[in-house]
Amino acid sequence: MPRSISSWAALAVTALLALASSPRGSAAAVSKNLLINPGFEDRLPGHPWMPAAWDTSISGLPTVFFGCDTFLVHSGHYSANVANVSNLLPMAHNWSQSVLVGKEAWGKDLLFTVWTRSNGVSGRAYCLLQAYRDTISKMAKTWGMPRDDAAQRLHINKVDDPIVDFGWKRLYFDDPETDWVKREMRVYCAPGVNIVFVRAGVTGTGQLLVDDASLTIEAPLPAPPLKVGENLLSDPGFEGDLNAWEFAVPPYAGLVVERDTTHAHSGKSCIHLETLQGPDYPRAPVQARMGVCQPITNRNLGGKRVRLSAWVKTDSLQGVAFLKVYSHGLYGVQQGIASEQFSLDTPWTQTSQILDVPADTYQLWAWCLYEVPVPGRVYYDDVKLEVLGPTPPPPTIPKPAAAEKAKKK
């Protein structure tokens, strides 16, 4: 006897429900959390409070405290916290976890979500998602040993370290006090990535609490289109809260990175870099670079010619200030031809650097730098990173006249 239309509809609904409840349907609907102990509920064996699978940054400073909290939690019984009470040495203090990935993640997006709560933060708290091709860290995790020991076992010297980041997304937030807030970061997992790091911490003073973290592999979102002449940088004039910018600051006393409202080239503000002098600020043992930067992760960057430009001003600077743009790709890191260098007293001057981006590039880093520790001040304003068009073809090299004559004979 033929079935009625309503019977066929009922069977179709039943089949769809069965498919949705099957293991394959569940995997498609909900991505697996790659983090171990994401809610900080499990203890490290033999330790009174350390959460299993998580690491803490190492500074050697007695002013930094890590712990687990049973009172301020987002869910479950525990959350993790990090607190810093001194800003004498500029350092980032964080909780972190590393995850090994392979071809199953290549060509997809990595999504890191975590709940945070700020308690008396002065400076910036942050969450960070990093995707690396890092042979040493991969093998250190596989072998269960420190990274330096793994490098020795692999016979890789520090100057030969092949580490390169293909994806980098940091979310800064500077509210002194917050309730629990869900933070989300996403990066494209480029071919070659073998280890992923998630972090949450502070770069100032105060306390950050962390709970219910998740790292999943998701369908990739389209890469943002690149328009010729469009500025790829956020807050290029330093008019905002500076949370779009990374601060590259070595752990030396007396280093200044701040928004300045008295020396702007345009608008109301610029960025001010300086090394304070005096008995309270001992000279650092070695010279290093300091500045501000932004990473641009976009797999459409390959094969483009880009230009980084900025206005720079120096005041009694006894070192040098300059721009740098780097491309990170499958075959390593490339950099543009060195830009002009500025010292002593320089009025506002525009400078630029051009880079032909290799085809394998997944990420660009745009830097405004100067060498520390030296007396003097540096100001940057109106920074721009733009695509000029496709990389021009290499010039044609004419054949020698003697070779042409021999060919005709």
Image (tube, rainbow, N blue to C red):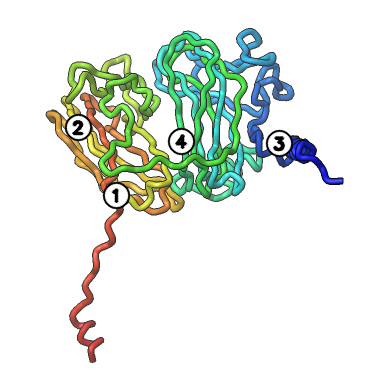
* Cα separation between marks 2 and 1: 21 Å
| Disc 2 versus disc 1: nearer the observer | 1
Residue corresponding to mark 3: 26
What amino acid is at disc 4?
Trp
From what the image shows, is residue 281 above or below residue 145?
above
Separation of marks 2 and 4 at Cα, in angstroms: 26 Å
Report whether 45 appears left or right of 186.
right
SS under mark 2: strand
Q: Can residue 273 be seen at all in this image of the molecule?
A: no
Residue type indicated by callout 2: Trp
Q: Along the polypeptide, which appears first: circle 2 or circle 3?
A: 3
Dot 4 or dot 1, earlier in sequence: 4
The spot of residue 306 in percent (x, y) is 29, 45
Q: Is residue 234 above or below residue 61?
A: below
Going from N to C along the chain, the mark reached first, 2 or 4, is 4
Q: Visible in this render: residue 57?
A: yes
Density class for disc 1 (Cα within 10 Å; few <14, some 14-19, many ≥20) is some
Of the pair 328 and 282, the residue shown nearer to us: 328
Direction from residue 309 to residue 2 in the image, left or right: right
Q: CA distance from mark 2 to mark 3?
A: 54 Å
State how far apart marks 4 and 3 are (Cα).
30 Å
Q: Kindly identify which residue carries mark 1.
A: 305
Residue 168's disc is 4
Q: Nearer the viewer, residue 378 or 20?
A: 20
Foreground disc of the pair 4, 3: 3
Viewer-proximal residue, 194 or 46? 194
